[in-house]
Amino acid sequence: MVEKTNEWSEIEAKLLYKSGHPQMVGWRFFRIMLTELWYRLIKLKGYKDGTEGVVYAIYQMWSKFVTYGKLWELQINEKK
């Protein structure tokens, strides 16, 4: 699962970069992660799945963090 996340996050980051995503700054990472956690746990009611739902929500939050971290790297490398 981690290997797939690494592959797909690369693809997602490149798509976000090509679409002209606004420059990543520190607070955006926290907002994106908290939004993903809220979406998975509350909006989709992942908490009802017990431990499995919570672990899944945390993993998806981490996946978003990795994707946007790679986007940030692409944006920094553009400036150099």
Image (tube, rainbow, N blue to C red):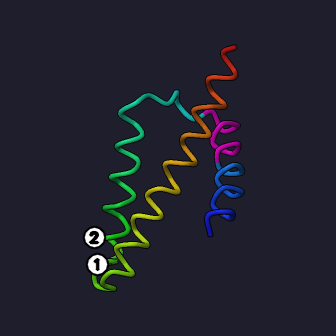
Marker disc for residue 42:
2
* 43 displayed left or right of 56: left
Residue beneath the point at 28% across and 78% down: 47
Marker disc for residue 55:
none
Residue beneath the point at 34% across and 73% down: 54
Q: Which numbered disc, 1 or 2, marks the residue closer to the eye?
A: 1
Q: Is residue 78 magenta?
A: no
Local secondary structure at mark 2: helix
- Majority secondary structure in the magenta region: helix
Residue beneath the point at 47% across and 56% down: 62
* 59 displayed left or right of 9: left
Residue beneath the point at 37% across and 68% down: 40
Instruction: Work out whether mark 1 precedes mark 2 in sequence or the reverse, and give the earlier one.
Output: 2
Please say if the residues under marks 1 and 2 sit with CB atoms less than 8 Å apart. Answer: yes
Q: In front: 2, or 46?
A: 2
Q: Quadrant of residue 38?
A: bottom left
* 56 displayed left or right of 80: left
Marker disc for residue 47:
1
Amino acid at the residue labelled 1: Tyr
Q: Circle 1: is it few (<14), some (14-19), or many (20+) Cα within 10 Å?
A: some
What is the magenta range? 13-20
Measured from the top left, where is residue 23 in percent x and y?
52, 27
The residues bearing labels 1 and 2 have C-alpha atoms spaced at a distance of 7 Å
